[in-house]
């Protein structure tokens, strides 16, 4: 089944213009690739069941929260995932952390989930509205400025000339403010234009 689904997605992707795949693979699957309105299999109306098979190496327990949802696709099928761009947990940045040690990283609150958790969504916003490389929450100019992104949480470890004040992308603000300012969130992108026919103030 996994092979057939992959083949079908590849055929759809091949039929679409390359601009559709500008930020990443989620663009080609659309909203219903991850969310199912009437046939949800997990929280956040997720279309794929959360991965309860892959164990967190620190806790020896299955991942929870949005990390388990992401691993529902991004893990080998033999480990409870769908096999789409599997993550090598032992070779990647830590994720699924209940808390962050402030001696290791100073993570802005905008990048933490409920209760101070550090999930996949700390670094990535996987919605197709995110125009940034690999759905990162910061524009790294296709990876050439990745040091500036790392410096958001690890400023002491990064090259001081590479550390910049960066804006963080979020798709979770439906008012149209898609970019959180460098530190306080004060300098947001302009709000969306009023809907056509909206009443004007006199």
Image (tube, rainbow, N blue to C red):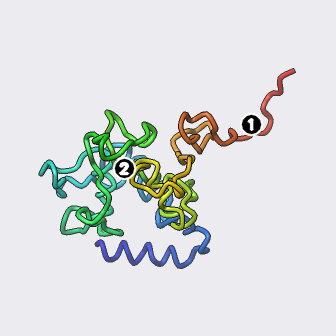
| Front label number (1 vs 2) | 1
Q: Which residue is drawn at 78% across and 39% down?
A: 196
Q: Is residue 26 left or right of residue 65?
A: right
N-term mark: 1 or 2: 2
**Dot 1: element:** loop
Q: In this view, does 106 lie to the left or right of 198?
A: left
- Asked if the residue under mark 2 is in contact with the one under mark 1, i.e. CB atoms within 8 Å, the reply is no
In the drawing, what numbered circle is on residue 46?
A: 2
Q: How many labels does the image show?
A: 2
**Dot 2: element:** loop
Q: Which of 92 and 119 is in front in this view?
A: 92
Q: Residue at x 23, y 63 (%)?
A: 90
Q: Nearer the viewer, residue 201 or 109?
A: 109
Q: How far apart are marks 1 and 2 (CA)?
A: 31 Å
Q: Is residue 116 left or right of residue 188?
A: left
The N terminus lies in quadrant? bottom left
Mark 1 is surrounded, within 10 Å at the Cα level, by few (under 14), some (14 to 19) or many (20 or more) other residues, namely: few
* Image position, residue 181 (x, y; %): 58, 40
Q: Residue at x 24, y 46 (%)?
A: 64
Residue 185 sits in quarter: top right
Residue 175 sits in quarter: top right
Mark 2 is surrounded, within 10 Å at the Cα level, by few (under 14), some (14 to 19) or many (20 or more) other residues, namely: many
In the drawing, what numbered circle is on residue 194?
A: 1
* Image position, residue 74 (x, y; %): 32, 63
Q: Which residue is drawn at 47% across and 52% down?
A: 125
Outermost residue toward the top in this view: 202
Vertical arrangement, residue 63 with respect to residue 15, above or below: above
């Amino acid at each position: 089944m996994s092979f057939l689904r992959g083949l079908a997605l590849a055929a759809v992707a091949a039929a679409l213009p390359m601009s559709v795949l500008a930020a990443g693979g989620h663009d080609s699957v659309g909203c219903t690739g991850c969310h199912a309105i009437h046939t949800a299999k997990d929280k956040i109306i997720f279309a794929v069941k959360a991965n309860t098979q892959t164990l967190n190496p620190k806790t020896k327990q299955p991942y929870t929260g949005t990390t388990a949802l992401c691993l529902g696709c991004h893990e080998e099928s033999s480990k409870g995932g769908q096999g789409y761009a599997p993550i090598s947990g032992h070779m990647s940045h830590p994720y699924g952390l209940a808390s962050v040690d402030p001696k290791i990283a100073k993570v802005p609150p905008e990048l933490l989930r409920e209760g101070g958790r550090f999930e996949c969504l700390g670094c990535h916003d996987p919605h197709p509205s995110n125009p940034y490389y690999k759905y990162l929450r910061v524009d790294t100019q296709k990876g050439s400025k990745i040091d500036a992104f790392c410096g958001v949480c690890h400023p002491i470890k990064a090259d001081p000339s590479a550390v910049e004040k960066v804006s963080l992308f979020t798709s979770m603000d439906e008012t149209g403010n898609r970019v959180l300012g460098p530190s306080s969130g004060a300098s947001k992108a302009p709000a969306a234009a009023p809907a056509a026919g909206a009443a004007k103030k006199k």
